[in-house]
Image (cartoon, helix red, strand yellow):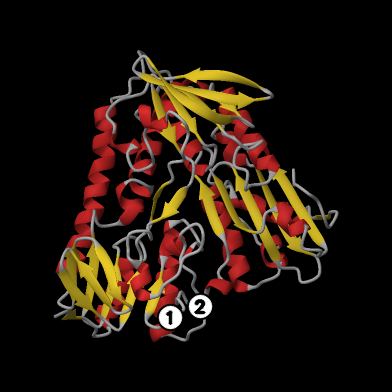
Amino acid sequence: MSERFDAIIIGAGQAGPPLAQRLADEGNAVAIIERRELGGSCVNFGCTPTKAMVASARAAWAARRAQALGVVIDGTVRVAMDLVRAHADALVQASRSGLRDAFEGHARISLIRGHARFRSPHELDVEGRGLSAPRIFIDTGSRAAVPPIPGLDGVDYWTATTATDTTELPEHLIVLGGGAVGLEIAQLFHRLGSRVSVIERHGRLLPNEDTDVSDAIQQWLEEDGIEVLVDAEATRIERHGSGPRVIVARGGGERAVAGSHLFLALGRRPNTDDLELDAAGVDTDARGYIGVDGKLRTPVDGIWALGEVNGHGAYTHTAYDDAQIVIDDLYGTGARSLERRIPAHAVYTDPPLGRVGLDETRARNTGRRILLGKLPMSAVARARERAETRGFMKVLVDGDSERVLGATVLGIAGDEVVHVFLALMAAGASYKVLRDMMGIHPTVSELLPSLLQGLRPVEPSIDEAG
């Protein structure tokens, strides 16, 4: 006999909790099932602990370069990894406790611990306990992809799940993967005091960004002392003493990179392979993602898929927005949908990258009449005053509709400043609204009108932007 609920949510990541809260507030009896820690990847090993460690790493970096701003620190700047870890752990625990208290404090929400598997489209088994509901929402997240590199199973390695658990500072960290996660981990450990090597199989770092972004970030990392190998394929891994040695094919030859620790940043895979989705009639694609429509509904009536499992965004903000789309569909106007969502993300290197909408390559290949504006961060007074002038701003505008198609802010506060463009795009307003704005001096955003005053037409089609 199954326990009956009005709605069941599998997973307490970033989409599940706000959806559970709203469903319960609307009078539904809700079960939320979690087999591990509350908060999903963001709270437990992603955003919260990594950004806390990034803050610690930046503090160490700022202390070492303080003399450039006239501040002399006598003695050695020492990093205490146990305190770095304690700072991150405190934030993680606070977030977990907040979620637990919110669930336990709501009379209509039942928090159930365990591994859920489908028995039928509306029935689940959780460690032998039967549950059923007419509405089931899947929010089970993803995990690190571990490719079958020969020899990998013979060495110890970190993934995004385990890297923030350490109180040990690696002597030499090897990072496999030059995407956002790999570069964030590489830079923060280098600033904490590790030697770092990054190995990327594509011809450049961040291959999904424009080449000017990739080139700038690689230059900064190398200037700071990080070894970067691009167009480099890890063909096998060996044990070398107590650490790993990665054999890399590059330029027609081979070279070995030996280190003390290995971090894998080679993508993620959705947690859909152990849900018994066949019993529910829910299909996945070749990569394991669940297909959904613009309202996050699967083809099976009464089943939704939110967050990383649907392949429409691997970020906390996209998961949270998934929940808002479903809530709007159930209780609002129904205007929100995946199709109306403006893509936006950040890369938390320092300085960070903020990007919204289309990048330059995609914008110029739309066939539209494109206007482009670009300015270096060295033109920003705030950046010069803080001696942090790395990077640039770039905006792409449809020359006919006057709407912003995309923007990149790579530099100081780039992850915050780019929201100005995001708001303009969401409003569907002409770029001239921002162009004619009076900004506050001295700020980073005050240069946005100047950026838009310098728009110029560009060729409509290119293979790769730079």
Q: Amino acid at mark 2?
A: Arg
Quarter of the figure with the N terminus: bottom left
Q: Is residue 132 above or below residue 153?
A: below
Horizontal side, residue 445 vs residue 115: left or right: right
Q: Is residue 215 above or below residue 228?
A: below
Q: Is residue 170 above or below residue 325?
A: above
Give the quadrant of residue 405: bottom right
Q: Amino acid at mark 1?
A: Asp
Q: Secondary structure at mark 2?
A: loop
The residue that label 2 is drawn on is 336
Viewer-nearest residue: 165 or 419: 165
Q: Residues within 10 Å of mark 1 (few under 14, many from 20)?
A: some
x and y percentages locating residue 4 in the rendered image = 19, 82
Q: Residue at x 38, y 85 (%)?
A: 331
x and y percentages locating residue 136 in the rendered image = 32, 76
Disc ID at residue 328:
1
**Marks 1,2: beta carbons within 8 A:** yes
x and y percentages locating residue 423 in the rendered image = 57, 66
